[in-house]
Amino acid sequence: MKVTYIDVSKHFGSFQAVDRLNLKIETGEFLVLLGPSGCGKTTTLRMLAGLEEASSGDITIGEVCVNQVAPRDRDVAMVFQSYALYPHMTVEENISYPLKVRKITRAEIPGRVSKAADLLGIHGLLKRRPKELSGGQRQRVALARAIVRQPRVFLMDEPLSNLDAQLRLHMRGELKRLQYELGTTTLYVTHDQAEAMTLAHRVAVMDGGRIKQLDTPLNIYQRPANRFVAGFVGSPRMNFVEGKIDLGERKFVGHTMAFPLQPQVLSRVAGQQRLTLGIRPEGVRVSLQQFEGGIPASIYVSEALGNETFLFLNVGSEKIVARTDATARIDIETKVWISFDQQALHLFDPLTGDRVPDGPAVPS
């Protein structure tokens, strides 16, 4: 079922939590609201659920404006961070409770509970109570309770944040498969970019109550619309260097580094004097041997993670992070030389933070 926000705002007193939000979630889409704490993502979700009233604007489910529709009549199911299970009820009673509230016939309830339990792999837990379950099992019960209603829209508010790292990874895969099988429109809130990147058809990155970019996970990572998105999405975060363009010398000049720019980069910055240059850690090349155009640096600290190594570098007064091969073993304070993959450079206006448009391809 399609969901639409039309110029929706929400304020609490003088605080503007959501500011003129326009968003369309297509039927069957898994859309993730991603952003830091206080950016307005949970408020956006709660307005759709009817738990918060929009200060202005319209919210529609299908073709119906639901601003004045009671929460229980919106036909949405919400999964909370805290699971919100009834401790005195068995798993079976927790799952069936929404059906009883909606006066589903007694003959139909067992079949629907059994189907939801089978889908989540918790059929063997139906006679237990929540206190007898692990965190992952409780989350599965909460999901089953939402699924059993067969709602038009699923709403999920950081449902995996209480789980340990390994279980979160497992449950991400389960959620993605579940949404694929059910095909239910889903709005998912998280501050965890790994969840957003792996689960979503599209991601809406929010800050200050506004959407800063709405796109596929891959496009948001590879072509961030502004510096906020570029810095928020990615771990470790994107490196940023402030500087200016010397068109005569055809180079970028920062406070503590300078290097020549290739023609395809220069074509984008011909009218730009000052610039913020961005480069993700995987775009930083590190060498123990000095080379032409190499920028001198030293190792501040090295973090070996088994499958890769992060090198944190001092480049004058700048701090740069490089993602390198797992076999890289370079001691602290070692002198190295670095360069940037210019095919992977991101350029931002230092005043607005907006991405500098990509120019036409230029032969090197």
Image (spheres, rainbow, N blue to C red):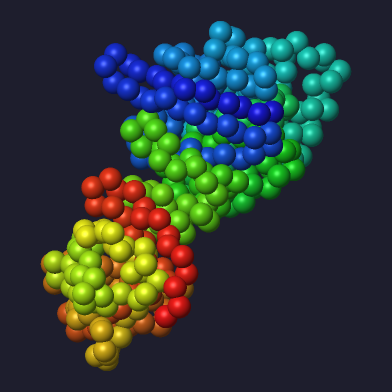
Residue pushed farthest right?
107
Q: In which quarter of the image is the N terminus?
A: top right
Q: In this view, does 253 lie above or below 32?
A: below
Q: In this rendering, would 132 be left or right of 308? A: right
Depth check, front residue: 218 or 269: 269
The quadrant where residue 187 appears: top right
Numbered disc total: 0
Which residue lies at the image location 37% right of the left edge and 67% below the top edge? 267
Depth check, front residue: 260 or 94: 260
The quadrant where residue 345 appears: bottom left
Depth check, front residue: 74 or 206: 206
Query: Horizontal and vertical percent for residue 14?
Result: 26, 16
Query: Horizontal and vertical percent for residue 258?
Result: 20, 74
Q: In this rendering, would 89 be left or right of 251? A: right
Query: Horizontal and vertical percent for residue 236?
Result: 35, 60
Q: In which quarter of the image is the C terminus?
A: bottom left
Q: In this rendering, would 264 be left or right of 67? A: left
The answer, for residue 327, to whether it is visible in the render is yes
Which residue lies at the image location 68% right of the left edge and 47% below the top edge? 177
